[in-house]
Image (spheres, grey):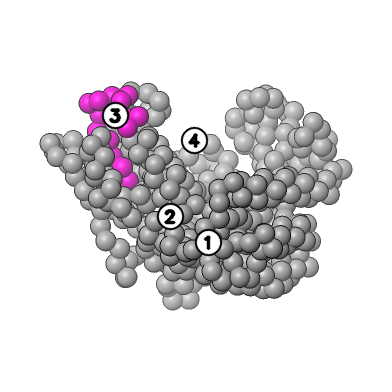
């Protein structure tokens, strides 16, 4: 039996794509082993969002070949899609596949095993591309599954390589999503996270389909306890979606809305489709209807031309909007995007300082948000494995609080009601 190992870099969509590839190899009788073990085939599912993503992808590729010089090493995903020639120059690489054609990965690997040459299966993206259906079989954890419902993006933010790597918006057919969710629920999953490259655009390429319609079709599935949305643009949160979150006890009170900057000048340079005023109005509208909702965000610091005053606007806006958590990224020049050629690149030392300030602010905002719930009862979906440091069960509430619970093994995988309190920097959930 051939042993195959996978390594995934980057986002949730990539993790889903890896699971979908694993499913194909499992079905064909391959043995899936840990990437740290010796394998006959190594598949590296790459990321190219930052320069670091590409160099990390190269490093992992070389590591795999060192582990077993006889192994077949395949590099797949965004990095080869954007720069196939550069990937083909890595001598350790035997097989290259882009973001298209992963439904045929098994066939490609088997061809490469019998070939004495490097093989390149990267295909150009067509305008009229369809969503490539590659369902998953199972996940290692059995409580929460992320499923990909959409691919591609038409926004072309000036710093982002993704539209070049993933092509234009394609949506997965409604019936295919329903079938996959039903299958996962039958296997014991209780929470489904809907993800995509540009989630709010789900259905934009189809007749009479959108995210709200999809969610309405998923909510009645028996056994499904929760639906969570991954990142969605604030401009794409419709009134209908807010109402659905307010009314439904299955749709999580959590929205991840990427802000990126609090300066209109920088938002425009980023080619983001909103101004600060629009974003503020959206947050106010959501909170007026779902008061305790967790609103998390992404912010980029040090975008070319970001002055001290622009940064200050971002800092103040984050404070004003009281995000419950945030991912702070230091701008990283990505060749092939317009922003890489912009003047006034910000010095790395300045980016580091700005990032530190926003991280400190984020920690304070997160604590403030969490404290509102101390003394309240919330439902947490407990994961199957215990936290390795504390030995406690751990899980998420619908509003994205990570709670630690001292409970018996049979509670793992269950949705339990806990009373929330803070202790030693953690959120403790007591069963009472
Ligand atoms: S919306 Fe902007 S940041 Fe998000 S994937 Fe599309 S281009 Fe990239």
Q: Secondary structure at mark 3?
A: helix
Q: Position of residue 205 (x, y in %)?
A: 42, 72
Q: Residues within 10 Å of mark 4 (few under 14, many from 20)?
A: few
Q: Secondary structure at mark 4?
A: loop
Q: Which residue is mark 3?
A: 65
Calculate the distance from the C-alpha at mark 3 to the C-alpha at mark 4: 26 Å
Q: Which residue is mark 1?
A: 344
Give 99 or 403, whichever is nearer the viewer: 99
Image quarter where the N terminus lies is top left
Q: Earlier in the sequence, mark 3 or mark 2?
A: 3
Q: Residues within 10 Å of mark 3 (few under 14, many from 20)?
A: many
Tell me if 259 is positioned left or right of 344 in this view: right
Above or below, 308 relative to 128: above
Q: Earlier in the sequence, mark 3 or mark 4?
A: 3
Q: Earlier in the sequence, mark 1 or mark 4?
A: 4
- Taking the magenta stretch, the answer to whether it contains residue 45 is no
Q: Which residue is mark 2?
A: 334
Q: Which residue is mark 4?
A: 140
Calculate the distance from the C-alpha at mark 3 to the C-alpha at mark 2: 27 Å
Write the start and end of the magenta stretch as one range. Answer: 62-76
- How many circles with numbers are drawn on the protein? 4
Give me the residue at 52% from left, 58% from top: 345
Give me the residue at 55% from left, 55% from top: 346
Q: Earlier in the sequence, mark 1 or mark 3?
A: 3
Query: Would you say residue 314 is visible in this rendering?
Result: no
Q: Residues within 10 Å of mark 2 (few under 14, many from 20)?
A: many
Q: Position of residue 129 (x, y in %)?
A: 32, 66
Q: Secondary structure at mark 2?
A: loop
């Amino acid at each position: 039996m051939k042993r195959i190992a996978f390594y995934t870099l980057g986002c949730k969509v990539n993790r889903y794509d890896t699971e979908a590839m694993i499913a194909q190899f499992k079905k064909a009788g391959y043995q899936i082993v840990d990437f740290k073990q010796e394998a006959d085939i190594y598949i590296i599912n790459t990321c190219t969002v930052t320069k670091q993503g590409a160099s990390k992808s190269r490093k992992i590729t070389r590591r795999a070949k060192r582990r077993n010089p006889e192994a077949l090493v395949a590099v797949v995903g965004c990095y080869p899609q954007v720069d196939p020639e550069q990937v083909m120059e890595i001598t350790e690489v035997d097989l290259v596949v882009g973001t298209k054609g992963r439904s045929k990965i098994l066939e490609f690997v088997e061809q490469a095993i019998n070939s004495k040459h490097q093989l390149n299966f990267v295909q150009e993206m067509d305008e009229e591309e369809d969503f490539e259906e590659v369902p998953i079989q199972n996940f290692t954890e059995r409580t929460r599954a992320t499923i990909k419902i959409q691919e591609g993006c038409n926004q072309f933010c000036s710093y982002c390589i993704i539209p070049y790597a993933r092509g234009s918006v394609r949506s997965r057919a409604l019936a295919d999503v329903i079938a996959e969710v039903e299958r996962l629920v039958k296997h014991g999953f209780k929470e489904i996270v809907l993800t995509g490259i540009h989630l709010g655009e789900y259905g934009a390429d189809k007749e009479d389909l959108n995210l709200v319609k999809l969610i309405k079709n998923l909510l009645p599935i028996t056994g499904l306890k929760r639906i969570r949305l991954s990142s969605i643009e604030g401009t794409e949160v419709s009134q209908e979606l807010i109402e659905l979150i307010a009314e439904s006890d299955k749709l999580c009170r959590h929205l991840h809305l990427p802000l990126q900057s609090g300066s209109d000048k920088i938002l425009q340079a980023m080619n983001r489709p909103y101004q600060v005023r629009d974003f503020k109005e959206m947050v106010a509208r959501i909170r007026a209807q779902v008061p305790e909702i967790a609103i998390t965000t992404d912010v980029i610091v040090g975008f070319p031309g970001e002055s001290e005053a622009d940064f200050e606007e971002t800092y103040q806006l984050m404070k004003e909007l009281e995000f419950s958590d945030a991912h702070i990224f230091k701008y990283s020049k990505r060749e092939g995007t317009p922003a890489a050629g912009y003047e006034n690149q910000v010095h790395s030392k300045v980016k580091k300082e700005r990032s530190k300030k926003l991280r400190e602010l984020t920690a304070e905002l997160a604590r403030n948000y969490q404290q509102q719930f101390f003394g309240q009862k919330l439902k947490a979906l407990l994961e199957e494995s215990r936290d390795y440091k504390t030995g406690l069960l751990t899980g998420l509430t619908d509003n994205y609080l990570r709670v630690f619970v001292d409970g018996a093994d049979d509670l793992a995988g269950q949705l339990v009601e806990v009373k929330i309190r803070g202790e030693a920097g953690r959120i403790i959930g007591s069963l009472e």
